[in-house]
Image (spheres, rainbow, N blue to C red):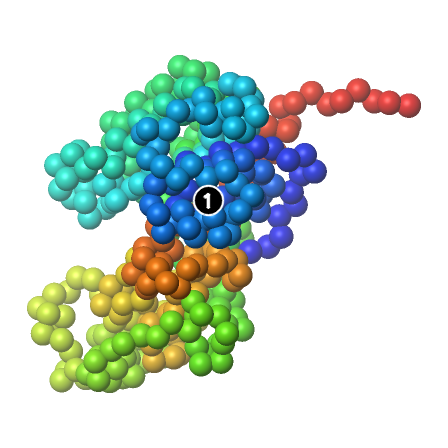
Amino acid sequence: MPAINTPVQKLTAVDLFSGCGGLSVGLQQAGFHVAAAVEVDSKAQATYSLNHPGVKLYAEDIRKLDVSTVLADSGLQRGELDLLAGCPPCQGFSRLRTKNKGASVYDPRNDLVSDFLRFIKEMLPKSIMMENVPALANDVRFQILCDEISNLGYKHVVQVLDAADYCVPQRRKRLILLASRVHTPTIAEKRAERVTVRQALAGIGARSNTKDLLHAMPERRSPKVMEMIKLIPKNGGSRKDLPEEFKLECHKRSNGFSDVYGRMSWDDVAPTITSGCFNPSKGRFLHPSYNRTITLREAAVLQGFPREYRFHISHGKEAIALMIGNALPPPFIAAHALSLIQGILGSQPSPPETS
């Protein structure tokens, strides 16, 4: 992503539901000092600590975490924190889940929105950032959160945006809430040009020529699947382009999920990077030119992570792909975090002039 002009003054942030660290990367790129993070998953904790050794990580269930402990450990009083940010686990609000409203209502992960609100009430931060799937906007718990923060004196804005408009090289519709009690928050301006797959993956090259263990992780396919992949046209080809004898029976019976066994296009953004990004049967995850799916390093880069971001290979493909797919794209976060920084600093009185 393009360089961000960060302010000289470092503001402090706390990252709730940090996952493997995408949100923290974005906050740091914008200029925030991330003082603390909370994450319950052990593999995500290990990845976060590997990349953010200077951040106090609370490796526990947020529902059992005392907010006053986080404030005290961060050296802050109530009202002093500049930004409280987070993304409560969103699987219960996903588009597929919300087709069945019962599944959405009774998924226990949805109640973690209430813990986000608990932290807001007890910390009273100057600003708030919350990111999630678009379907959250229609959930009563989110509507309660918006009403409650309004009662606390926060002005807020909510929009559903495409991360591709903010230097993330993939299509990814996300809901974002920005709130502040010290200024009127505004959504960051969209970038004029999108970052393509070609630009994002430039220089990464073949797996056989790398010392990057994440990029070199092997894939195992049956001979039939490998033959299918070879026959799919380069640079945007689809399973619909396959000869009839290579089309799977399940694909012949369904017109849906047309991206399955599709290739990415060099000069377009990637599709949404999900936890299935290493499996051609889960979406348009075939490399534009090589006869393979994208590697997990390529997936992380398309998610917006720096190329040097580290993952424990011992965690295995599925666990790493889950962390990458669930992560918040750092450039998307950085753009909106910088908008909040400018508002917070603009609300503070200028120091007196000295001779």
Q: Which of the 4 image quarters holds residue 107?
A: top left
Q: Give residue 130's position: percent from left, percent from top.
A: 41, 35
| Residue for point 46% across, 16% down | 153
| Residue for point 51% across, 18% down | 78
Kind of residue indicated by mark 1: Leu
Residue under circle 1?
23
Q: Nearer the viewer, residue 145 or 175?
A: 145
The answer to whether residue 194 is seen in the rendering is: no
The answer to whether residue 231 is seen in the rendering is: yes
| Residue for point 34% across, 80% down | 291
In the rendered view, tell whether residue 338 sits above or below residue 44.
above
| Quadrant placement of the N terminus | bottom right
Q: Give residue 247's position: percent from left, percent from top.
A: 15, 78
Q: Give residue 317's position: percent from left, percent from top.
A: 32, 64
- Classed neighbour count for the residue bearing mark 1: other residues with Cα under 10 Å, few (<14), some (14–19), many (≥20): many
In the rendered view, tell whether residue 94 sits above or below residue 108.
below
Q: Nearer the viewer, residue 100 or 311?
A: 311
Q: Is residue 307 left or right of residue 298?
A: right
Q: Extreme right residue here?
A: 355
